[in-house]
Amino acid sequence: MSLRFLFAFLITMVCFSCPLQPSSGEETTLEQMRACRYCRPPFDFINQLKPSASGRQYAPDRKVDLQHLRLDVTPDLKARTVTGQCVLTFTPIARPLRELTLGAVDLNIKEIKANVALAGYELTNEGLEIAFDPPVQPDKQ
């Protein structure tokens, strides 16, 4: 039996032998759970989830059908930055598209090009808002 296997077996036994359930009606808190940090369930992300005022959360309505997404990304490890280019091919769903909002949190955008006329774009806290003039018709890409 190798030392690695023995070490892994011992760690597993220690982690899974820790009491995870409260005894006889006690309420469990994170401090009361005496499990090792590798076995403890990730409770932190549950506390960060905040429901909406109505208690329901839905994805936003889709305005476009995404046909193709091409990403060209180059990381710079020394500067801790990433530069890249994104090419989207889409068609509007059912109605002419006047404005498209893309998620672009904490991004610096230098340029936007399109094969249709652009009215402009704006980078907000919510994302990148691209306005088309005239609106893109549902049969166009």
Image: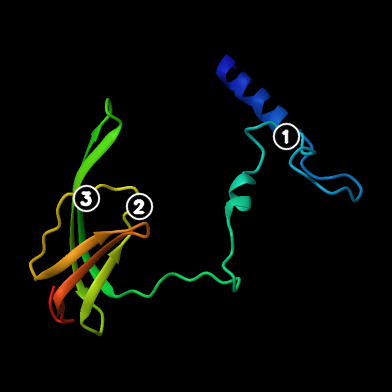
- Residue 62 to residue 74: above or below: below
What's the residue type where badge 2 is placed?
A: Val
**What residue is rendered at 25% in x and 61% in y?**
122
Q: Decide: marks 2, 3 in contact (CB < 8 A)?
A: no
- Residue at 84% across, 45% down: 22
Residue 55 position, x and y percent, is 61, 71
- Mark 2 sits on what residue? 105
Residue tagged by mark 3? Answer: 109
View extreme (bottom): residue: 94
Q: Is residue 103 left or right of residue 1?
A: left
SS state under label 1? loop
Toward the right, the furthest residue is: 24
Question: Circle 1 is placed at which residue position?
Answer: 35
Mark 2 to mark 1: distance in Å?
36 Å
Q: Nearer the viewer, residue 62 or 3?
A: 62
Residue at mark 1 to residue at mark 3: CA–CA distance: 45 Å
* Residue that protrudes farthest toward the top in the picture: 3
Looking at the image, residue 28 sits to the left or right of residue 39; the answer is right
Q: Residues within 10 Å of mark 1 (few under 14, many from 20)?
A: some
Q: Position of residue 73 (x, y in %)?
A: 21, 43
Query: Could you tell whether 49 is left or right of 65 in the image?
Result: right
Most foreground residue, 16 or 6: 16
| Residue at 65% in and 43% down | 41
> Can residue 120 be seen?
yes
